Amino acid sequence: MMPPDSATTAAQFLRAPRAAAIAGILFSLLLMASVWLLRESLPQDPLEAGTWLQTSSQSVATALHLIPFAGISFLWFIGVLRDRLGAREDRLFATVFLGSGLLFLAMLFFSAAVVGGLVVTYTAEPTRVLGSATFSVARAISYEVMNVYAVRMAGVFMIATSTLALRTGFIARWIALVGYALALLLLLTSRYIDRLILVFPLWVLLTSCYMLLDDLRRRAKEKDPQDFRSEG
């Protein structure tokens, strides 16, 4: 029989991949749904006069309500990954991994809050918002924060995560290499490419699905010998 501490550690080790995978999948699906709704509702031009407030404010509000839950899932994803790495994590890349992830989340929330503020203000004073300088500045700030700074932080997070993956082997090598390639795309591509931010949740979804399937395979391998002994 395993000592209590060893049993607890083993149970945590087995739960960590599945918890990280589920959190990553939830984050990916929620963020992709939110981005899709926003991109369908908001024009690509950040200096557009704001007619979307008249026609698509409900869709925008729905998208903004999904973002906090995506953020909670992303925090859980980061936390469980760090727990999975444990003593194997490199302090330098672990710091970049955590810092870039938190910065991405902060910028995502800030950009969403600015757009949400425009929706609330329009509801209260519709005639004063459309075409105003305040609207133009707020819309441009939200666009720049999301499409320039948040996208770059997502790229840095992918590089740090891929580097940790290559050093510790917690995901497949080919997924880490794909992460490097997509991270360079986020870091070097123009801000005006529509839906570029979707690259990030798609990669997290790929990583999470791999971890979930790998965890199920490990559990199946550990279960087979026990079944064999019980049948004997």
Image (cartoon, rainbow, N blue to C red):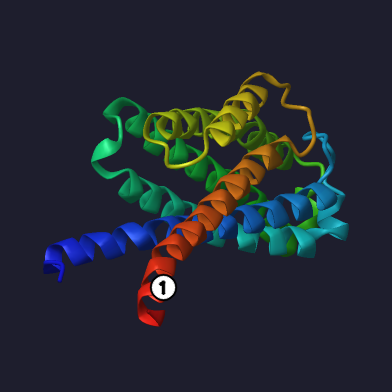
Instruction: Specify whether residue 24 is in view.
Output: no
Q: Quadrant of residue 148?
A: top right
Q: Position of residue 93 (x, y in %)?
A: 36, 28
Whether residue 19 sits left or right of residue 108 in the image: it is left
Task: Decide: is 206 above or below 227.
Answer: above
Q: How many marks?
A: 1
Task: Decide: is 194 above or below 17.
Answer: above
Q: Residue at x 78, y 27 (%)?
A: 192
Whether residue 9 sits left or right of residue 146 in the image: it is left
Residue in front for this viewpoint, 126 or 228 = 228
Q: Residue at x 70, y 42 (%)?
A: 198
Q: Quadrant of residue 137?
A: top right
Whether residue 67 sits left or right of residue 5 in the image: it is right
Task: Decide: is 225 above or below 138.
Answer: below
Instruction: Specify whether residue 194 is in view.
Output: yes
Q: Position of residue 217 (x, y in %)?
A: 50, 58
Mark 1 surroundings within 10 Å by alpha-carbon count, few (fewer than 14), some (14 through 19), many (20 or more): few
Residue in front for this viewpoint, 58 or 63 = 63
From the image, which quarter does the N terminus lie in?
Answer: bottom left
- Pointer 1: what residue? 228
Q: Position of residue 53 (x, y in %)?
A: 81, 55
Q: Position of residue 26 (x, y in %)?
A: 58, 60
What amino acid type is highlighted by mark number 1? Answer: Phe
The furthest residue to the bottom: 231
From the image, which quarter does the C terminus lie in?
Answer: bottom left
